[in-house]
Image: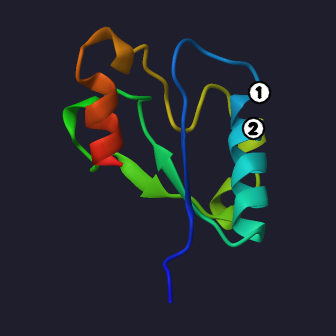
Amino acid sequence: MSSPKTLAILVGGGPAPGINAVIAAATIEARNHGLRVLGCYDGFKWLVQGDTSHVTELDIGELSRIHFEGGSILRTSRTNPTKTQDGIRYVAETL
């Protein structure tokens, strides 16, 4: 039996109004279709370093009321993996 497909969500760049509602809606829809959902804290910051300790599984129960919170529950970062020659490769290998 194959493992379930996985969706990873991260927030890159500056603050975005309503981003928590987007994170919740995407997670709920993906989980309802059988996907595993991962939340990547601090945008690409840790992924370009090969660090997965800042990645967590998201589930519907913990996200059902986050649209009331300000900011991003996953936090954000302006780290741009395209700024270094190997950035995208590091992110892909980490994921």
Would you place residue 94 above or below residue 71 in this image? below
Residue at 43% across / 38% down in the picture?
41
- Relative to 25, 44 lies left or right: left
Could you say which quadrant of the image residue 22 lies in?
top right
For badge 2, the amino acid type reads Val
Is residue 46 visible to the viewer in this orientation of the structure? no
Q: Report the residue marked by disc 1.
A: 18
Label for residue 22? 2
- Relative to 94, 24 lies left or right: right
Image coords of residue 23 (percent x, y): 68, 42
Is residue 21 visible to the viewer in this orientation of the structure? yes
Question: Of residues 25 and 5, which is closer to you in this image?
Answer: 5
- Relative to 92, 75 lies left or right: right
Could you say which quadrant of the image residue 91 lies in?
top left
Q: What element carries label 1?
A: loop
Question: Of residues 81 and 63, which is closer to you in this image?
Answer: 81
Residue at 62% across / 64% down in the picture?
59
Q: How crowded is mark 1: few (under 14 residues within 10 Å), some or many (20 or more)?
A: some
Image coords of residue 70 (percent x, y): 67, 27
Would you place residue 28 above or below residue 82 in this image? below
Point out the frontmost of discs 2 and 1. Answer: 2
Residue at 35% across / 41% down in the picture?
92
Image coords of residue 57 (percent x, y): 49, 60
Could you say which quadrant of the image residue 60 lies in?
bottom right
Question: Of residues 56 and 7, which is closer to you in this image?
Answer: 7
Number of marks drawn: 2
Label for residue 88? none
Q: Label 1 near label 2: C-beta < 8 Å?
A: yes
Would you place residue 8 above or below residue 44 in this image? below
Q: What is the distance, in whole Å, between disc 2 and disc 1 at their CAs?
A: 7 Å
